[in-house]
């Protein structure tokens, strides 16, 4: 079974600073996708960044980047130049196969890290 | 455009009521999902529809009844709910269900349901 662990329930960072959110996962699959989703108080679950396991290069989306360590099964999110609008719950997620490939895939989420960006 | 629209945004219902949640997407996605999210918890998968057919039911009680009338629309019919069913109900869609690269899921803003 795939499990996703986020060990930091809450974090705080000052505006313009850099913060790293940690995520570890467990899987026996060799090829998979990992995601970071952001859920602000508005409740919308927003895709921040994704990483394909077979790609060694770390994904980057503007101020967001990941440090993907496949052997260690670690997938951390770095937010540079933090902004007040980054305040949200951040979920790390693993794309898991449901029953078989015809059933499709679903997201297995970690428990989330609540990030507060302060002025 | 990665918009998934859910209505209503908020819903309060009694345990004897019948209500429905609605989800729409116009991105041509052929897979749609219902997730349930309790406060301060991650979303949990309820149902998966693939090409308008129910492909996964994660042992959800029968008081929740999903329906996919067409490729753009997903409903969740609610009947005889319990107070513990109060939660945020999220809808998501993805281009396909098969093939990981086609399974990137995009979420709506959810319906906040309160059962009295």
Image (spheres, coloured by chain):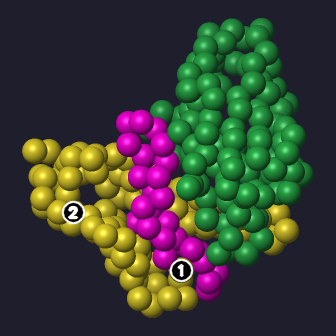
Chain colours: A yellow, B green
Q: Residue at x 27, y 47 (%)?
A: A85
Tag 1: Cα neighbours inside 10 Å, few (<14), some, or many (≥20)?
Answer: some
Q: Residue A52 has which mark? A: 1
Q: Residue A19 has which mark? A: 2
Q: Residue A32 has which mark? A: none
Is B50 rendered above or below residue B84? below
Query: How far apart in space, not on screen, are marks 1 and 2 (Cα)?
Result: 23 Å
Is B29 rendered above or below residue B69? below
Indicate which disc, 1 or 2, sits on the residue closer to the N terminus: 2
Query: Residue B63 lies in what quarter of the image?
Result: top right
Tag 2: Cα neighbours inside 10 Å, few (<14), some, or many (≥20)?
Answer: some
Which residues are the magenta region? Answer: A23-51
| Secondary structure found at label 2 | strand
A73 left or right of B11?
left
- Residue B60, position in %: x, y? 78, 38
A89 left or right of B26?
left
Q: Assess whether residue B42 is covered by the magenta stretch.
A: no
Q: Residue at x 70, y 18 (%)?
A: B82
Query: Residue A74 lies in what quarter of the image?
Result: bottom left
């Amino acid at each position: 079974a795939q499990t996703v662990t986020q060990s930091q329930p809450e974090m705080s960072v000052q505006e313009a600073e850099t913060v790293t959110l940690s995520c570890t996962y467990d899987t026996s699959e060799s090829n998979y996708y990992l995601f970071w989703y952001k859920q602000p108080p508005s409740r919308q679950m927003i895709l921040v960044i994704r990483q394909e396991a077979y790609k060694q290069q770390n994904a980057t989306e503007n101020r967001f980047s990941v440090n993907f360590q496949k052997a260690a099964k670690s997938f951390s999110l770095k937010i540079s130049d933090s902004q007040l609008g980054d305040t949200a719950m951040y979920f790390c997620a693993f794309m898991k196969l449901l029953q078989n490939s015809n059933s499709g895939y679903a997201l297995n989420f970690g428990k989330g890290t609540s990030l507060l960006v302060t002025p | 455009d990665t918009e998934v629209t859910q209505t209503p945004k908020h819903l309060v219902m009694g345990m004897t009521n019948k209500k429905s949640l609605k989800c729409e997407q116009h991105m041509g996605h052929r897979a749609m999902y219902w997730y349930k999210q309790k406060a301060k918890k991650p979303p949990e998968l309820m149902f998966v529809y693939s090409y308008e057919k129910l492909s996964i039911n994660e042992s959800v009680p029968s008081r929740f009844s999903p329906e996919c009338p067409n490729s753009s629309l997903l409903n969740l019919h609610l009947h005889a709910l319990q107070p513990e069913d109060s939660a945020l109900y999220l809808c998501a869609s993805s281009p396909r269900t098969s093939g990981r690269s086609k399974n990137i899921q995009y979420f709506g803003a959810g319906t906040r349901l309160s059962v009295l």
